[in-house]
Image (cartoon, rainbow, N blue to C red):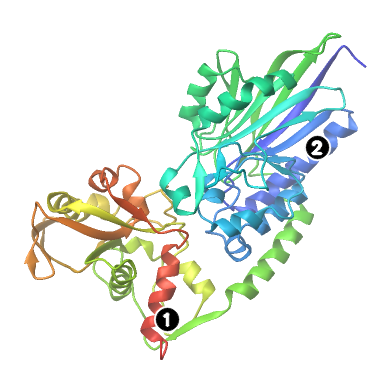
Amino acid sequence: MSSSFSVYLYHTNDIHSDLDQWTRTAAYLKEREKFRQERGESVLLLDLGDHTDRVHAVTEATRGKGNVELMNEAGIQYAAVGNNEGITFAKEELNHMYDEAGFQVLLANLFDTDGRRPGWAEPYSIHTTKEGIRIGLLGVTVPFYPFYEGLDWKITEPEHVIETFLPELREQSDVMVLMSHLGYPQDLELAASYDFDVILGAHTHHLLEEPEWVDNTLITQCGKFGTHAGELELQFEGEEQRLSGIVGRTVDMRRLKPSPITERLLGALEDEADKDMNEVVTEIAEPLSVSWTQDSPFASLLADGLREWCKTEISMLNSGLLLHSLPAGPVTKKDIHRLCPHPINPCVVAVKGHVLEEVVKKAFTEEMIRLPLKGFGFRGEMLGHMVFSGMQIEADYEYGEWTVQSIRIGYELLDHAETYELATLDMFTLGPLYTGLSNAESKQYYMPEMMRDILADVLVKQYTAGS
């Protein structure tokens, strides 16, 4: 054997069920694996999580198992778990998502509520190459505490499990790799605190065209939607097979030819999904129209339904949640999914009257109505006009802006000191959109139901006889 050699790692992250693009990424992974093996070189194929996204019908219909089939076909050997796997599926669905996985799932900081680790995951793995190089792989995911708790999981701080497993990982490994679905900012902190050789990143969709070094740790991440994949070359030399260097790059997948085999598998999965999604849920007698810039019947119906479903006095949701109007006639599961594909959950927030007033006034600004929101589970085009149920709002429109004149809860004027139970969307409680809701102390998330489940429930109750 030569005194110097290399081991190659190919990695993907945050595919988000862009499965057409995956046919190109899969072609690249398979070609690189074959090329390296023909040269007698060792290769690992890894995915860093959020391969799934229930915006795609295949993922929705198969509850992620179709994604696992596609990962199997591409030759993935190790996979981390992202929040789209962890908190957008019911616990039972996640417990069976990887039943047929041909790869090892690595996740160190997720447990059942009794403290036991789920049987489909290991905290870490030691991969030994044919040259005898031991690569330690540890997987962690971002701890969205209330969402995991709502699904009957226990999620812990990644630092805790890193400190637990790092000594034994260091003892058993020649190279230590953290498979992180935590995001670039936290990866930077971990690189400065722990002696990993490599942190393979995900979650925040950063595209690091050249990997970055923090002290002696290399950090990389390949954007989102499979537009890029990563290649790392681990270089070894000497009789002691010492790690002498790491070279990395990202590769643009968008102009590559798709894999015909992957395309056929995807086509078969789409056909099966169609059969499931064509099931009729109900039939509506008249069309339901939605507008993103003003009140509309469809959005108002859903706001009423959300208030009733959550058993609150008031509710609010953005009309951009509904991507299309709905014509009269049969309504299928596919229609429901097409109308409301977002992995967004209902929630109830306890909010003071003065905070609610701030929220309403901000919602009526043109900036918020036309906001082309990305992230927080939203898969639409613009946030849209806010729709309320159980609230009467008087507002004037002048010089291109709305001015809120009064807010009534039922028939009573809003009381600044009163606490109101507001049914709304989880995305309004997660970030900077409405800080009054984000900072609220009392939030109840309904899991695993998504807003399209509420939509289906509303339509069935409204239009199905005897329901």
Q: Which numbered circle lies on residue 33?
A: 2
| 84 relative to 68 in the view: left or right | left
Q: Residue at x 44, y 53 (%)?
A: 150
Label at residue 436: none
Residue drawn where x is 60% and y is 54% of the image: 94
Residue 63: tell me if it is visible: yes
Q: Which percent across, then down, holds residue 33? A: 80, 37
Confirm whether residue 384 shows in the render: no
Q: Is residue 433 above or below residue 271?
A: above
User: Is 440 above or below relative to 60?
Assistant: above
Query: Which residue appears at 59% of the width and 26% of the height?
Result: 164
Question: Which quadrant is home to the C terminus?
Answer: bottom left
Q: Earlier in the sequence, mark 1 or mark 2?
A: 2
Of residue 291 and residue 465, the one placed in the foreground of this image is: 465
**Quick check: marks 1 and 2 in contact, CB under 8 Å?**
no
The residue indicated by pointer 1 is: 460
Pinpoint residue 367: horizontal percent, then vertical percent.
Answer: 24, 49
Which of the image's four quarters has the N terminus? top right
What is the x, y in percent for residue 295? Answer: 24, 69
Occupied quadrant, residue 97? bottom right
Between the C-alphas of marks 1 and 2, the distance is: 50 Å
Image-based side of 142 in relation to 116, left or right: left
